[in-house]
Image (tube, coloured by chain):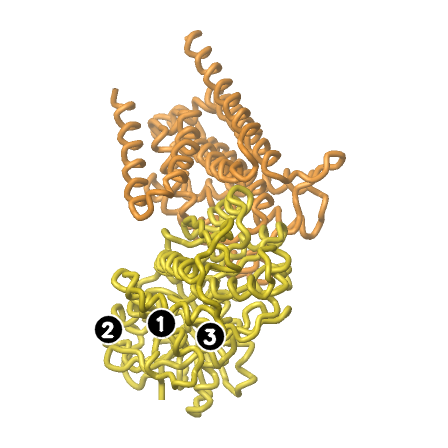
Amino acid sequence: MAKILILLAALLLPAAAFAAAAPEGDPIVIGGLFAQSGPAAVVGTPSKLVAEMTVAQLNATGGILGRPVKLISYDTESSPDVALRQARQLVEGDKVLAIIGPTSTGEGLAVKKYTEEKKVPAIMTVGGDAIIAGGKFGPFDWTFKAPQRTATAVDKIYEYLKGKNISKIAVMSSKDAFGQDGLAELKANAGKFGVEILAEESFDPKGTDFSAQAFKLQAAKPQAVIVWTIGPAGAIAAKNFAALPGERPLLVQSHGQPGPSYLELAGEAAGGTIMPGTKLMAPESLPDEDPQKIVIESFIKAYKDAGIQEKFPLNTHSGYAYDALALLRAGLEKAGKADPEALRAALEKLQNVVGVSGVYTTSSQDHNGLHGDSMIMLIVDSGRYKLAP
Amino acid sequence: MASFSLSRKASLALFFAAMTAVGLVTPAHRLIGVNQHMFLAANVLALNFCLGLGGQISLAQAAFAGMGAYASVLLHARFPGATLVIVPTVVLGVGLLAALVSRPMERLGEGFLAMATLCVSLVCVNVALTLEGVTGGAAGLMVERRLALPGVGELGGDRLTFFLFLLLLALGSYIFLALRDSRLGRALAACRDDRHAASSLGIDRPAVRAVSFGLGGGLSAAAGVVHGHYTGFISPEQFSLELSLKALLFLVIGGPGNLLRPILAALVLETAMGWLQFLGEARTLVNGLLLGAALLAGYWRVRR
């Protein structure tokens, strides 16, 4: 255990680290919002455990700014209304400095409206881009996002397809915020990569069979079909496509799918499907000079040591809460004081913060800071994720 | 009879006095939870018009609330400050729509009516998802305008919203009681207890039930209007089937036809379940046990 702590200390502190003194003084209070029940709980519950694990690591290595970190987290029940209620409890009741989470995009939008008005920095772990898109979704001065943008994943897929000389595709997206977000980005960027979308279909993410949609899309004779959804629906779609007669198109899944549950649910049908994912999914494929390699390896080790792996095997979303806290820590250290406005300004000017999901470099326009190089294309080969050739 | 009506009045007065105290004492950031439960309670009362008075199981309450919220938010974006015109129009419009929808559905049998209202709910969610340009689709809609009255100013904030909901509940309760004891209420009760007997007595069943269904729809829409502007963000998932099912659950726990018990069941049980966060993973189980116990208690009370 001591070895791990030393290793983590070396990782979490900058290279020219001062000796890890025990943190002292008033704790810096951080609020956590995680969906621990409801449909988003599969992502939210492990996120909470990762956040707790990371805070423990932080405190073991000197805290932030020499002060201990205290995390107060609540369950958002996967509901925007409850998320807003808990956010208000965090800000007005518990007086937190900043918020990490929530888990689903709908929750994020409901919380964001409030945190923007209250001027509370929020580093969200939601999939959708709407929270930092501006325009009709309102300003995003105080809102940041740890996971990759949808557009980043779309670019990654199109780049890969282009390399394989695939230009005729079809799209199947779920009728929820995540699916519609993906569909919009896929359509918007198709021209840039010379890709033609021959057909599109949508489905209910809670559905149990999408054979009809799969059959219709196959009839359009695309070279590849991109399925954009999160959760079990992606595995169902993979099964439906595998059951099609005749020549089947290449199946591409979204960056929301990589994880053991997809393999489990889709079984044989998962074989040969490709998808973009975080480097967390294939750490052995990373070259030694990749700055993320050491962070990812120690994260995986800590994840296993903390016993989270047994209950929630690693998936592509596992690192988001860690990244949110890494961003928060980098921001606070850049700001030099635990002040919301200083933290916000610092979070906008981060450079090369190495996290599990990528290397973050933010700006006032880019409140995410990740690009295509933070993702890899994965292929399912004999029940495992491998780097796609 | 006199003592009964006195105790009813007393319990009503006690309920509203207690709620007023809650609204004055609770700190603002806690009040948001109470307000969310009040929104549910208003929907429970709305469903009570359909199920309690008319005997119609409706799963469309969330759809009517959603219609109210979306219509009001979209109209306010267009005509800011026209609250005085928009809110009555939306509430009356949704109520009228509910009454109109109820007439053809009434031709279906009891079980099929529940199915039809379920479809209304699903259709509404799908319409909101499909009309992306207007409703924002699955991503939802940011609410920029608050309700505002000339001379009073903006009707926002936790405490003011709480009293808006309380006013809505009081108004709904008054109409409910007045309707239940009226000639129309007796006709509704007759339809509920024996539809054939009611028809043979010359009661126009579809017409009287359309009234109760329409009132329920209007009340849900009014609750949706207040809730939508208060939350500041609306999306189809907030008005999904789950809300309708919750309203039905609490109405059944409290007993359809009772005025206060279902509302109290919604407020007390929802608050209790909100407090159970510290239980962690065991919470879902405890929530289930709590609801099961409440259902059994309701059943036992009726049996006795």
Is residue A275 in view?
yes
Dot label at residue A358 = 3
B203 or B232, which lies in front? B232
Residue picked out by circle 2? A267
Q: Are marks 1 and 2 in contact (CB under 8 Å)?
A: no
Q: Amino acid at mark 2?
A: Gly
**Residue drawn at point x = 39 percent, y = 31 percent:** B265
Dot 2 falls on which chain?
A
Q: Are marks 1 and 3 in contact (CB under 8 Å)?
A: no
Dot 3 falls on which chain?
A
How many C-alpha atoms fall within 10 Å of the one at disc 2: few (<14), some, or many (≥20)? some
**Residue drawn at point x = 43 percent, y = 48 percent:** A74
* Res B252 quadrant in image: top left
A164 or B240, which lies in front? A164
A131 or A347, which lies in front? A347
Element type at mark 3: loop
How many angstroms separate mark 1 from mark 3 (CA)? 15 Å
**Colour applied to chain A:** yellow
- In the picture, the quarter occupied by the N terminus of chain B is top left
Q: Amino acid at mark 1?
A: Ser
Residue picked out by circle 1? A298
Q: Residue furthest top?
A: B2
**Residue drawn at point x = 49 percent, y = 53 percent:** A30
Labels 1, 3: one chain:
yes
State the image coordinates of residue A66 (x, y, percent, origin top left): 50, 58
Element type at mark 1: helix
**Colour applied to chain B:** orange
Q: Eyeballing the image, is A354 above or below B26?
A: below
Pointer 2 or 3: first along the chain: 2
Pointer 1 or 2: first along the chain: 2
How many angstroms separate mark 1 from mark 2 (CA)? 30 Å
Q: Eyeballing the image, is B7 above or below A224?
A: above
